[in-house]
Amino acid sequence: MCQNTQQCCSTPDECKAYRDIEEQIGHCTPDQAWGMYFVSTGSVRENIRRAVMKHIAQGNKALLVAFPELAPAKKGDHESG
């Protein structure tokens, strides 16, 4: 239902919640985003995770530093074992 997101929601209310969180992430500092993520649970935490990943993919280097585990995998990157 959400445009430009990969199956982020199944109802209009879920889409609005995601868009609101995505917008908020865009306006806050990486520390604030981390704080929001740390204290949240469930679908709110998942929406924050997806919003952070989207902002990182769009080039937000500050969020990349705060959330390195959410960086998109580079082609050819894998652990050898």
Image: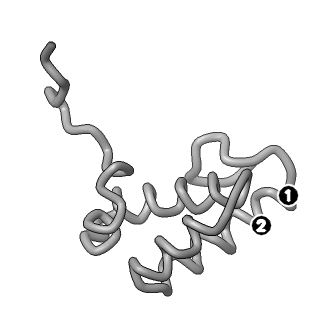
Q: Position of residue 65 (x, y in %)?
A: 26, 66
Q: Position of residue 78 (x, y in %)?
A: 19, 25
**Residue 12 versus residue 76: which sits nearer the camera?**
76
Per the image, label 2 sits on a secondary structure element best described as helix
The relative height of residue 77 versus residue 23 in the rendered view (above or below) is above
The Cα atoms of the two marked residues, 1 and 2, are separated by: 6 Å
Label drawn at residue 74 = none
Q: What residue is rendered at 28% in x and 66% in y?
A: 59
Q: What residue is rendered at 27% in x and 38% in y?
A: 73
Q: What residue is rendered at 58% in x and 73% in y?
A: 36
Q: Is residue 9 left or right of residue 78?
A: right
Q: Position of residue 41 (x, y in %)?
A: 70, 57
**Residue 68 versus residue 53: which sits nearer the camera?**
68
* Residue type marked 2: Lys
**Residue 6 versus residue 51: which sits nearer the camera?**
51
The relative height of residue 25 versus residue 4 in the rendered view (above or below) is below
Give neighbour class at mark 2: few <14, some 14-19, many 20+ (Cα, 10 Å): few
Dot 1 and dot 2 residues touching (CB under 8 Å): yes
Q: Position of residue 38 (x, y in %)?
A: 56, 66
| Number of numbered callouts drawn | 2
Give neighbour class at mark 1: few <14, some 14-19, many 20+ (Cα, 10 Å): few
Q: Is residue 38 left or right of residue 10?
A: left
Q: Quadrant of the C terminus?
A: top left
The relative height of residue 38 versus residue 14 in the rendered view (above or below) is below
* Residue type marked 1: Pro
Which residue matches tag 2? 16
Per the image, label 1 sits on a secondary structure element best described as helix
The relative height of residue 20 versus residue 46 in the rendered view (above or below) is below
* Residue at the extreme top: 81
Which residue matches tag 1? 12
Q: What residue is rendered at 73% in x and 53% in y?
A: 43
